[in-house]
Amino acid sequence: MNDIPYIGCINMKHRTDRYDRLRKFLKLTKFGDDIHLLRADRHEIDGRVGCFDSHLQLYRHCLQRGCEYALILEDDIVFDLEQVAECVKNANHIMKTYPDWCKINCHDYGVVRVLETLTPHIYRALCVGNQCYFISKTAMQKALDTGITKNHIDVQQLIDFENNTFLITPPMIRIYASVSDNTNENIFTNICCMISQQTELAQTLFHDICMKCHNNALRPCHEVVSTIWFNSLKVEYNAGNKSSGIKLCDSTISLITDPV
């Protein structure tokens, strides 16, 4: 699995608990040592801007190295080690089968809308949350050209990459139950955040219920709820889809094996 051209991780410097756990799990994934780590300070504006900035900095770093795609990880994750290899295999299948792909979500969080079932484990689906995902060179360049907007980055990408976003299930990670450094205004997104911050079990059950409802007799009800959520996010996107004029920071990005 060390053939992934670029792996980038984001960690807030004050979250040493997440940093220590992330390093421990990455050693078990067999991704290799060529993993790039951005340890960010709190952004002077707010957590939303800081999150947006950190992801774009990793995109810039990846493209400067001529990589075709990246796997981006946030620090509030726990790997399901039994699913990592299969998830990477499914991601490679998507990349080969759908050359216009932009983003492949690999986390059990925030499934807003399932558009199409492609295989029992691969969907065209829209998600919020950027905890663990593959992103293509084209998508990274588009995100950099757009820059930091007034949206949350996952809401921006939800619509910008709407027709070329995929979901793999079972996912390779679940989200670690801990208090977020980000802020949200959307009521449905806040419900997801509240669930993920309380318990990993509740969050996983929420994901499983969403996927099972999509695949059984409850699908019409699930589609009604998901449509309401998606439309609320689209309103949020339209209101915030404008340049903030904020320039990217120049945080240090080092290999995760380097001394802290």
Image (spheres, rainbow, N blue to C red):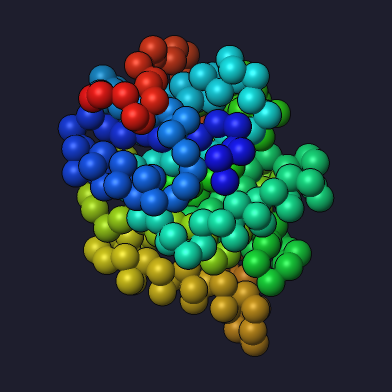
Task: Give the image quarter of residue 41.
Answer: top left
* Residue 172 placement (x, y as % from top left): 49, 57
* Residue 31 placement (x, y as % from top left): 49, 43
Instruction: Name the residue located 79 percent from the left edge and 46 percent from the top edge.
Output: 96
In the picture, measured across the screen, residue 210 lies left or right of residue 92, that is left
In the picture, measured across the screen, residue 174 lies left or right of residue 117, that is left
Instruction: Name the residue located 57 percent from the left edge and 64 percent from the top edge.
Output: 169
Q: Return the residue found at the far bottom.
A: 217
| Location of residue 254 with respect to 24 vertically, above or below | above
Instruction: Name the residue located 65 percent from the left edge and 55 percent from the top edge.
Output: 89
* Residue 202 placement (x, y as % from top left): 33, 71
In the picture, measured across the screen, residue 123 lies left or right of residue 196, that is right
Instruction: Name the residue located 50 percent from the left edge and 50 percent from the top edge.
Output: 128
In the picture, measured across the screen, residue 13 lies left or right of residue 51, that is left
Residue 177 or residue 235, whichever sits in front: 177
Task: Give the image quarter of residue 38.
Answer: top left
Q: Is residue 109 visible?
A: no
| Location of residue 100 with respect to 60 vertically, above or below | below
Residue 22 or residue 141, whichever sits in front: 22
* Residue 151 placement (x, y as % from top left): 47, 34
Q: Is residue 14 visible?
A: yes
Instruction: Please identify the quadrant where the C terminus is shown.
Output: top left
Residue 37 or residue 233, whichever sits in front: 37
